[in-house]
Amino acid sequence: MKVAVVRFPGSNCDADAWHAAKDAGHAVAFVWHRSTDLGGADVVVLPGGFAYGDYLRAGAIARFSPVMKAVEAHAKAGRLLLGICNGFQVLCEAGILPGALARNAGLSFVCRWVTLRVEATDTAFTAGYRKGQTLRAPVAHGEGRYVADEATLDRLEREGRVVFRYAGDNPNGALRDIAGITNEGRNVVGMMPHPERAAEALLGCTDGAALFALAGT
Amino acid sequence: MRWRVRVRIMPRQGILDPQGQAVAHALGSLGFAGVAAARVGRTVELALDAPAEADARDAAKRMCERLLANPVTEDFVVDTAEALA
Amino acid sequence: MRWRVRVRIMPRQGILDPQGQAVAHALGSLGFAGVAAARVGRTVELALDAPAEADARDAAKRMCERLLANPVTEDFVVDTAEALA
Amino acid sequence: MSARPRAGDPAITPELVRTHGLKPAEFDRIRSILGRDPTFVELGIFSALWSEHCAYKHSRPVLKTFPTTGPQVIQGPGENAGVVRLGDGWAVAFKMESHNHPSAVEPYQGAATGSGGILRDIFTMGARPVALTDSLRFGSLEAAHQRYLFGGVVKGVGDYGNCVGVPTVAGDVCFDDGYEGNCLVNVMCVGVLREEELIRAKAAGPGNPIIAVGARTGRDGIHGASFASEELSAESEAKRPQVQVGDPFTEKLLIELSLELIQSGHIVAIQDMGAAGLTSSSAEMAARGGVGVEIDARLVPVREEGMTPYEILLSESQERMLVVAHKGREAAVAAICEKWELTSAVIGRVTDDGMYRVRWGDEVVAEIPGRSLVDEAPVYHPDAREGEAAIARRARPLPATPAQPDLGAALEGLLDLPTIASKRWVYEQYDTSVQTNTVLGPGGDAAVLRLRETPLGIAVTSGGNGRYVWLDPYEGGKAVVAEAARNLAVTGARPLALTDCLNFGNPEKPDVFFQFREACRGMSEACTALGTPVVSGNVSFYNERPGASVYPTPMIGMVGVLGDVTRRVPAGFQAPGDAIVVLGHCNGALGGSQYLSWMSGEVYGAPPRVDLAAERALVDFLVEAAGRGLLRSAHDVSEGGLAVALVESALAGPERMGLRADLSPLSRRVDAVQLFFAEDQGRAVVSCDPARLEEVRHLAAKRGVPAEAVGAVGERGGAVRIGVNGWTVERPVGRLAEIYERAIPRRMERAAGA
Ligand SMILES: Nc1ncnc2c1ncn2[C@@H]1O[C@H](COP(=O)(O)OP(=O)(O)O)[C@@H](O)[C@H]1O
Ligand SMILES: [Mg+2]
């Protein structure tokens, strides 16, 4: 498949996402944030980093980048879109996914390996997992506490749109241990942990690789 | 005409404000008695060109809605607008 | 008696405020004309028990000096103090 | 046309000269170079370039004695960073730098801008930064102000590196009263490049444009270089506004921009505007290239109105670069800057008259023979004499060890010392896995990164024991190099070369200069013995307050290479039943040890002596054993001694495992306390598959390394059981983990205060 990795000024996991997608056998290209064209990509990845320095709020400025119009259209058309960490923050700020990512409850940036439980396997990104399966992946963020109002949270649960939950160690105080969610159409997934950092045995873990395999397409 | 407009953006009631809690706790352990609670928000100070104060305030309000505040987690008020030289 | 005291902590004049610059730039590219500059600071809202307003303000000032503001990079003002229920 | 004072400039009085940190004799020298009084701008320029920080006035002759060459060295000292060959056409650029004074005044920004500066030193060589390390020293965490400094520094290092996307993968932290009043913040950056992409900061080609790139210039940090060259005092506290603020977002863009510029072929040289800003970057680039430069300060993009040429030249605003481009490529350079949304402006030209000339429009405000700024800086040979107190401290006899030692209480006490305890509280605030190269992250002795598309691994470590140097500068100097090499070798990496940060007190005091000279002598000998030349470094003097200097602390950053990264060896035990082997001699050295100070509250005695031949043998053994896949884990023995090293090996694994060990066979000559806690150098704890124990023994014998099998790795969550001479300490591994992991967070949960 054709995968586009968007680069905002300040993205810093762009190359990591590129490699993970490449290793999964896809044709991968970078798209600069000023571009208004996604080059016919089947899958768009908004990678981790600190777009625009995360000044004001993580993702707040990046969501207005020129490329975001095309990203929104891509999502509306039901095509695949993955936001990892900063990418997830951008998706929430842009309203493509509900809720927001607030400052970690512990107030510090936190980087460590966590355990995730797969809650939804009906997205293209998680079709390669079993429901209830646990995975390991690193988190690395300062603003990763998922928050939304009760009604939104209930709705996410009811519709099976919580994709990943922290199992045991919740590193940021996210409500209901939410680590990743999907949209109504299940074509957009946002998550705080970094599956691209857990996709190679040499780096200690391959649990994240299946996410890039896109078994569900 | 140039205005200084100040907007205040605070965590919404009901949303956990760990920073405020940490501040209240730290003040207590530094020996400040009588701190019942603390909340920490953001102030954005804008130097704005606008014909009249009402326009400056109005522009600031739209900026908050569009960019400066996140409605999921934050409330804002346009606090002051004063004429600059 | 309980007071709500609000302190405003802003980057000192002349000190680089990259956040303010980013905000000003972003507002400009969102089409808001007339933004000459922006600075981003913090507001701390305290619920304080003190006998009188002056005491509450004074306590807030000492809290800023001790903990809330960084004297090297920030200036603060005790903005408002109002009686709470 | 010669430089003239500008209207409004202050008169050049002896007082003004003094406040510029220049001695009367130095001022006379300036007058004789110029043949006239300097202008105010010129005075500022000399003050910056002849400051200790830029000119190394007190240290240069000693630094010249370091070994700096070897077949692996591509670029030794003298450039922005040293460069060493890895193989397959790949090289690493690395350097370490101190930001002690700024951090003591403003820990968050001081540390952040320290990281920013050292990153720029690396990518200006054409290398992509792949790792940061930080070595930190504070006073005791029992004091609120030390908690404030520690918390702020860690946040500053973290926020900066995290934002630019360079993992902070190693470092060390010590808390000791010897650093009360003057914390040390040393940051190393490591970058990777193709050998042919190396670029040196050497201006060339008269007529070539000089371009300022990146952040605009503000009034921040004016005279930071001279600030770093004096003692902290009430007066320097009042100079606080000099502290600069970092913008890692701009830095991230600068990294990408600079690497693109270098690859574009449009530019001749690039250098960051670090200490002493535009002045030092332009003067140093000119001096290296043997050319002159002419700059119009009025063309420099500024952040504030009304800035004078003096301020523009000496500002230390962060995230700025100075570029020399090929003539005619101005537009191409500007286009690349625009792509990365960064400001750029042509501000001057390279000239062929060798002069360092600054204009303000039509006026000439400075005109100085360029070489005089860099090459004619004064050099001093201060007196060196060891202090009486130091001699007495070292000679003071150690107390007899108790006949009935409570080894268990001592072990728990040492694990609870913040210096020894887990630094997880620190490194979990650092992004350690961005760039997806981190094969071994923090928590062991050195980090290992893979080099993508090659079989190679790069190992990095940084640290240094200031106590040993304080007690015996020469032996201590040897020990810092030896420990760094050992920390690399336990991962299986061959040590290649080092960078240093020499943190000392006021060199004009004979006892301080003695410490400096002797520590450097010890380091040099160790470098030669271990084959690890010095390729870059930095000196930080004046780390003191009235009345006391900090522990003399040469910090070492060392880089090594693994031919096959899949052979890297982790620090922690991997499998129950594996054999535990102790390598090296146990001589029972307790002088200056953590045990001694834990027990007595004092630091004294002779520190462990370093047998360099034995260190070399140990390193060779570890590298060969790893290469042959003999080892499951390896961890060196350092602070806290063997018992602490054993516990750390148990705690560092993927799952905490117990262990059984009997230390009695290690030596008949030393007692139980010494076997547990002595800090003899040249030792390591390794584990291996019992089936390969014979091979390990055989190889050790061949290399002349003592190797004693002392026990076996226990069950997951089991007991740690260490016996010696009939005594046994037994604790559940979970309990030791709790002490070791909670020591720092427990203290940091108490309030900090400025
Ligand atoms: N400031 C720091 N930054 C990053 N990692 C650190 C820091 N301090 C300690 N660590 C990590 O904690 C581990 C233990 O540190 P330390 O006890 O100093 O090790 P050693 O004695 O082997 O040098 C090392 O992996 C080190 O990299
Ligand atoms: Mg070690």
Image (cartoon, coloured by chain):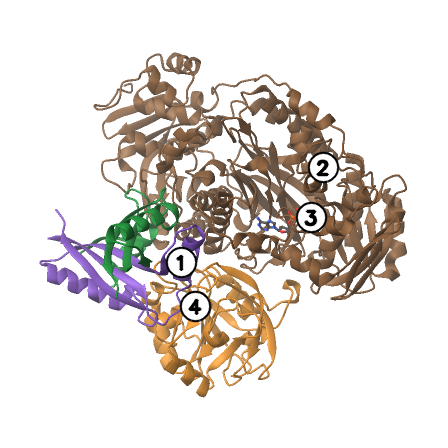
Chain colours: A orange, B purple, C green, D brown
Of labels 4 and 3, the one closer to you: 3
Residue D58 against residue D705 in the figure, above or below = above
Q: Chain of mark 1?
A: B
Residue A97, percent across and down?
Answer: 39, 76
Residue A159 visible, this orientation: no
What number is the disc on residue A87? 4
- The image quadrant that residue D566 belongs to is bottom right
- Marks 3 and 2 close (CB-CB < 8 Å): no
Are discs 2 and 4 both within one chain? no
- Of label 3 and label 2, which has the lower sequence position? 3
Instruction: State the count of labels.
Output: 4
What number is the disc on residue B24? 1
Residue in the foreground of this view, choosing between A145 and D120: A145
Q: Is residue A204 left or right of residue D130?
A: right
Q: Rounded to the nearest whole Å, what is the CA distance between mark 1 and mark 3?
A: 34 Å
- Marks 4 and 3 close (CB-CB < 8 Å): no
Check disc 2 and give the amino acid type: Gly
Are discs 3 and 2 both within one chain? yes
What number is the disc on residue D7? none
Dot 4: what SS? helix
What number is the disc on residue D531? 2
Q: Rounded to the nearest whole Å, what is the CA distance between mark 2 and mark 4?
A: 46 Å
- Marks 1 and 3 close (CB-CB < 8 Å): no
Q: In this figure, which residue is indicated by the disc labeled 3?
A: D414
Asked if disc 4 is less than 8 Å from ligand 1, the answer is no
